Amino acid sequence: MLPKGAIDKIQANVSKPCFWKSLSPGQNWKSKSMRIIPEEFVRRTPGAFEHRVVFSVRWENSWQLWLERDKNELFMIEEDWNEFVDDNHLGPNDNLFFRHDETMNLEVQIFKNNGDEIIDVPLEVEPETEPFHPTPKKPHRETTPASASVFGGSANGGTNSRGRQRSNDVKNPERYLLNPENPYFVQAVTKRNDVLYVSRPVVQTYNLKFGPVKSTITYLLPGGKKEEGETKIYNGQPCFSGWSVLCRRHNLKIGDSVVCELERSGGLVAAVRVHLVNKD
């Protein structure tokens, strides 16, 4: 556990509701008690956390966790919490600092007992002093959000003359575009799909510019259907809300791929034309 002085220093300039999690003797990170969202925190954020929460971390990954009530306590679903624990290789010397960002969103910082903050993707877990057996996973080395697809979906990073990355999952994604000159990327639907991220390679390749935070973004779907979301910035990365609603309403499943064609107005990204690859 972090010394009280270190905790006070970290919280000194934090005005938003926050809380800590660290292990007590006999606990491990998958203990049921670790999944509780403190009642005092819930009272200080009325209406913010009813059905789900989204964690974001320094290296721009994010996790969506569904919530459930058990008597008078609010719990994160075991499967979702355990995935977060495994992905971050949490060990006995880790301390989690949760800070309310906005509705449903928490910024999570990971600190070691010596006060050092983890600011990059954890690659391995330290030896446990208490029994703890996380599900083995390959080290995560990505620096893009977990909910964002690979730009073009390629594992080998090939690009064409326009700078678009080729895709192994979607063959010739350009054929889906309404305007072949528009920016685009291939998006895989994942469990953590609360927002639609636009990765840095896409932003840089096309020199994309976005409207102000909370400005409206329109999703254009086949058949003239439309959905609306808002422009957001999480950890310095642009993204659009409303993606999870779109996936649910249009019955997109985990593993489905779509081609996201970006349309600009006045130099700013104003719409995402969604081509349902697996629905053709």
Image (spheres, rainbow, N blue to C red):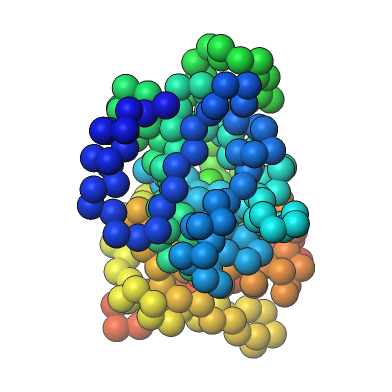
Q: Quadrant of residue 69?
A: bottom right
| Residue in the picture at 58% in, 34% down | 85
Image position of 60 with respect to 42: above or below: above
The spot of residue 204 in percent (x, y) is 31, 55
Q: Quadrant of residue 96?
A: top left
Q: Quadrant of residue 155?
A: top right
| Residue in the picture at 42% in, 26% down | 1
Front in this rendered view, residue 5 or 15:
5
Front in this rendered view, residue 207 or 246:
246
Residue 131 visible in the current orientation:
yes
The spot of residue 163 in percent (x, y) is 38, 51
Counting labels gives 0
Front in this rendered view, residue 17 or 205:
17
Image position of 82 with respect to 275: above or below: above
Query: In the drawing, does residue 138 fall left or right of residue 159?
Result: right
The spot of residue 247 in percent (x, y) is 67, 67
Residue 186 visible in the current orientation:
no
Image position of 245 with respect to 201: above or below: below
Image position of 177 with respect to 166: above or below: below
The spot of residue 230 in percent (x, y) is 45, 76
Front in this rendered view, residue 242 or 26:
26
| Residue in the picture at 43% in, 82% down | 216
Query: In the drawing, does residue 268 fall left or right of residue 126?
Result: left
Residue positioned most to the bottom:
224
| Residue in the picture at 32% in, 28% down | 3
Query: In the drawing, does residue 88 fall left or right of residue 265?
Result: right
Specify the quadrant that holds the C terminus.
bottom right
